[in-house]
Image (cartoon, grey):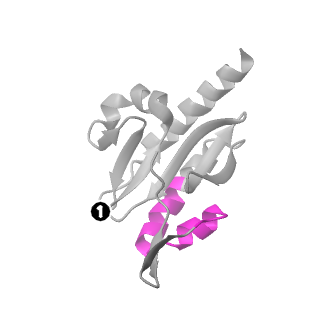
Amino acid sequence: MSQPVQKFQSDKKIMRQIFKTVDEYIKSFPESTQKLLKKIRKAIKENSSEAVESISYGMPAYKTNGKPLVYFAGYAKHIGFYATPTGHSEFAHELSNYKQGKGSVQFPLDKPLPLDLIARIVKFRVRENTSKTKK
């Protein structure tokens, strides 16, 4: 996964900003993007009450049972959502309207977020991580 950390210009060098918290990460975006990022965060938290939130690969990351659950990241024109290849393959038909990569999908900033779909993907990944732990 590429690291979508914010870049800023300082003394003619491009510097990468490292975030320590998800709140800090979200606050680094324009207000309109912050609202969308907060909605995705809320959907993740409401559908994975046991998830541990952190910053990984320079973006908000969630784990259950010590295993990656989902990640999300803000970009200039979209929000990247990463639910591992299995999370995306399980919902391939519903995600087919969005630009995708292996284990990633892009939700354009100028379109409504598919929050119900995100919630269902998160629930699927929680079940998947739980079943892997029981084996």
- Left/right of residue 56 with respect to residue 88 in the rendered view: right
Residue for point 60% across, 42% down? 47
Which residue bears the numbered disc 1?
Answer: 110
- Left/right of residue 46 with respect to residue 28 in the rendered view: right
Provide residue 115's location: percent of width, then percent of height: 45, 48
| 26 in the magenta segment | yes
Judged by its main secondary structure, the magenta piece is helix
Residue 115 appearing in the image: no
What residue type is disc 1 on?
Asp
Q: Quadrant of the C terminus?
A: top right
| 81 in the magenta segment | no
Residue for point 71% across, 23% down? 133
Residue for point 73% across, 18% down? 134
**Furthest residue in direction front, as rendered:** 12
Front residue (pair 16, 120): 16
Is the residue 110 above or below the residue 2 in the image?
below
Task: Please provide the residue range marked out in magenta.
Answer: 18-40
